[in-house]
Amino acid sequence: MGVSAASWIHPVLALALSPLLPGVINRVKAFFAGRNGPPLLQGYHDLWKLFRKGGIASRTTTWVFRAGPLVNFACLLAALAVMPLGAVSAPLPFDGDWLLMAYLLGLGRFFTVAAALDTGSSFEGMGASREVQFAVFAEPALLIGLAALARETQSLSLSPIYAGLAAGGELPLRILLGAGFFILYLAENCRIPVDDPNTHLELTMIHEVMVLDHGAVDLGFIQWGAALKLWVLGALWAGLLPLGALPGPLVRLAAGAGAILALAILTGMVESVTARVRLLRVPQLLVGAGVLCALGLLLTFR
């Protein structure tokens, strides 16, 4: 599967459209609640406002505090370089890039947690400890799911993995991994039922509490990075759809982007009809995602 011009369009498309995803989710939630909700393009307005502001930092913080948002954003950009979409090859595919993608997400998480701990705030430390605790269950599930895809397609690169899956692949495997990846999508992006991104209750916050001391440009990179993470993990899920039969790479790329937007709509629907589970139940939810991915891996040994 060769690299085409459409492969390089994907990262640009992700950077341009990812801020739209939180707006889609919020509008769907507002629809279910009978409200008008914020504008669909609110995310772009927020980024424009934050990047024009000047920020301040506590004297107790070090360079780690300022590096956290930038490193996380850079890790997500690097993940886009190896992430295919709509059966269109990634810009920089190579054997083992699925492991690199998982480690890039982990590295971004590490620096976000380190930046929160660098503030010396016990409040942010609480959110950081929860983030790390849940990552212990989420990351193995993600690796097991990716290993199942690698074994099914007999490939070690995400681009041929999803190209082979688009051309064939068992329906039960798609269903199991689709359900498992959707749970991971909600958990990794701190969405309901794992976390409520709109809450300000200290006993329920995970991601939002880690970024309370960030502002201006730093907060802008955090919000843009959160939107990019929605896109990257959404692309993992969208790759399970049979888009390989569509004619032309641009059409497949557009279909993949449409699938990510549809996933955002589904996320808004889930958040509208479910409640956040107790923190003690979150590991059980993530273990369930791991079991679904493990069952998918077992199917590949048939």
Image (tube, grey):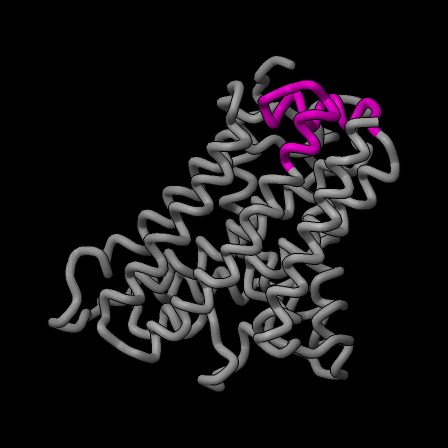
Q: Residue at x 57, y 17 (%)?
A: 3
Q: Residue at x 14, y 71 (%)?
A: 60
Instruction: Find residue 230 and report its horizontal and vertical position in percent.
Output: 57, 53
172 left or right of 215 in image: right
Q: Is residue 217 above or below residue 252?
A: below
What secondary structure is the magenta-colored segment mainly?
Answer: helix
Instruction: Tell me the quarter of the image containing the N terminus.
Output: top right
Query: Does the stretch in magenta take in 286?
Result: no
Query: Is 8 in front, or is 126?
Result: 126
Instruction: Find residue 106 and report its horizontal and vertical position in percent.
Output: 44, 47
Q: Is residue 13 above or below residue 8?
A: below
Instruction: Find residue 69 and report its horizontal and vertical position in percent.
Output: 33, 55
Query: Do we see residue 246 in this rendering?
Result: no
177 left or right of 217 in image: right
The residue lying furthest to the right in this view is: 171
Q: Residue at x 48, y 84 (%)?
A: 203
233 left or right of 225 in image: right
Q: Quadrant of residue 211?
A: bottom left
Query: Is 131 in front, or is 5?
Result: 131
Q: Residue at x 30, y 59 (%)?
A: 114
Q: How many marks?
A: 0
State which region is magenta.
146-169
Instruction: Find residue 183 and report its horizontal and vertical position in percent.
Output: 68, 57
Query: Does the stretch in magenta take in 165?
Result: yes
